[in-house]
């Protein structure tokens, strides 16, 4: 059975439009589904321990680094375990569904933290050899309050879709075969009272 990894990043629970579209997609999926809801269970932000633990063999630590490593041992272990779990989950899927809304013209921090923890040279990216996930299908669902299409005043200000399509789709990075769905103007009703009071 083909396995779909679904990652949710909206903080709005059942009211999330990205989730609602992703729910239709998941309901139609015939295989297994593994879910990670970053709003319910955020992954920690990548820090110095997580970065250096990837690249410095313990035998090459300077005395200062040794002291820091001793101090940080549990933290380093924690980050390695976290990265291991995220990487295995990512590599174990055959297809991907990312429900990631537009927050402040960009990627919500919980999803950025997931990317930073999961993208590792030599394990999940194509920077040091072919990406293991190359060519697997992926769908990004990204709801946004405004409109960003050609002719809209905000056209060109969506910095999420270009960034995600590069990170997820570039051959040197995740190398996925990415399709993007952008439900727009979800804030139209929320903004309506403000627009009316402005006109009065
Ligand atoms: C913190 C935050 C920042 C937002 N920033 C933007 C924005 O920059 N542009 C926009 O069009 N909508 C913005 N919105 C509105 C959301 O994109 C909109 O509510 C969308 O439907 C959220 O996706 P969801 O329904 O899947 O949660 C923002 C909402 C929040 C909560």
Image (cartoon, rainbow, N blue to C red):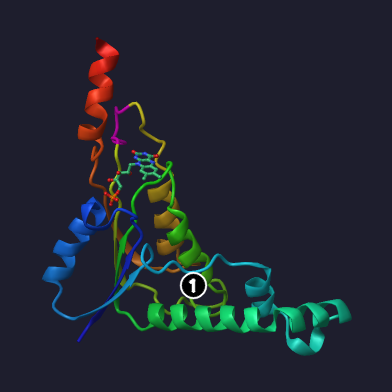
Considering the whole magenta stretch, tell me its main secondary structure. loop
Of 60 and 19, the residue lying toward us: 19
Q: Identify the magenta region.
A: 146-152
Where is residue 152 drawn, in percent x and y? Answer: 30, 28
Secondary structure beneath disc 1? helix
Residue 150 covered by magenta stretch: yes
Name the residue rendered at 52%, 68% in the picture.
44
Please tell me in which quarter of the rendered image ligand 1 is found. top left
The part of the image, by quadrant, that contains residue 128 is bottom right
Where is residue 164 drawn, in percent x and y? Answer: 41, 56
Decide if residue 191 is on the left or right side of residue 159: left
Q: Quadrant of the N terminus?
A: bottom left
Residue 79 covered by magenta stretch: no
The part of the image, by quadrant, that contains residue 27 is bottom left
Label 1 Cα crowd, 10 Å radius (few <14 / some 14-19 / many 20+): many
Decide if residue 25 is on the left or right side of residue 89: left
The residue labelled by disc 1 is 118
Residue furthest toward the top? Answer: 200
Where is residue 196 drawn, in percent x and y? Answer: 23, 18
Answer above or below: position of 2 versus 23: below
Where is residue 84 drawn, in percent x and y? Answer: 50, 83
Answer above or below: position of 149 versus 160: above
Name the residue rendered at 28%, 48% in the picture.
143
Decide if residue 8 is on the left or right side of residue 172: left
Q: Quadrant of the C terminus?
A: top left
């Amino acid at each position: 059975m083909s396995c779909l990894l679904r990652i949710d990043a909206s903080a709005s629970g059942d009211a999330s439009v990205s989730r609602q579209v992703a729910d239709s997609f998941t309901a139609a999926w015939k295989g297994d589904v593994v879910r990670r809801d970053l709003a319910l269970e955020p992954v920690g932000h990548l820090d110095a321990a997580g970065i250096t633990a990837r690249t410095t063999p313990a035998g090459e630590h300077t005395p200062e680094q040794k002291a820091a490593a001793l101090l940080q041992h549990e933290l380093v272990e924690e980050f390695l375990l976290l990265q291991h779990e995220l990487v295995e989950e990512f590599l174990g899927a055959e297809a991907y569904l990312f429900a990631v809304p537009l927050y402040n013209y960009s990627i919500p921090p919980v999803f950025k933290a997931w990317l930073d923890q999961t993208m590792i040279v030599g394990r999940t990216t194509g920077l040091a050899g072919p990406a293991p996930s190359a060519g697997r299908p992926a769908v990004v669902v990204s709801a946004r309050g405004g409109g960003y299409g050609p002719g809209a005043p905000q056209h060109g200000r969506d910095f999420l879709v270009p960034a995600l399509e590069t990170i997820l789709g570039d051959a040197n990075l995740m190398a996925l075969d990415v399709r993007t769905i952008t439900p727009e103007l979800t804030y139209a009703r929320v903004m309506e009272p403000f627009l009316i009071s402005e006109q009065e």
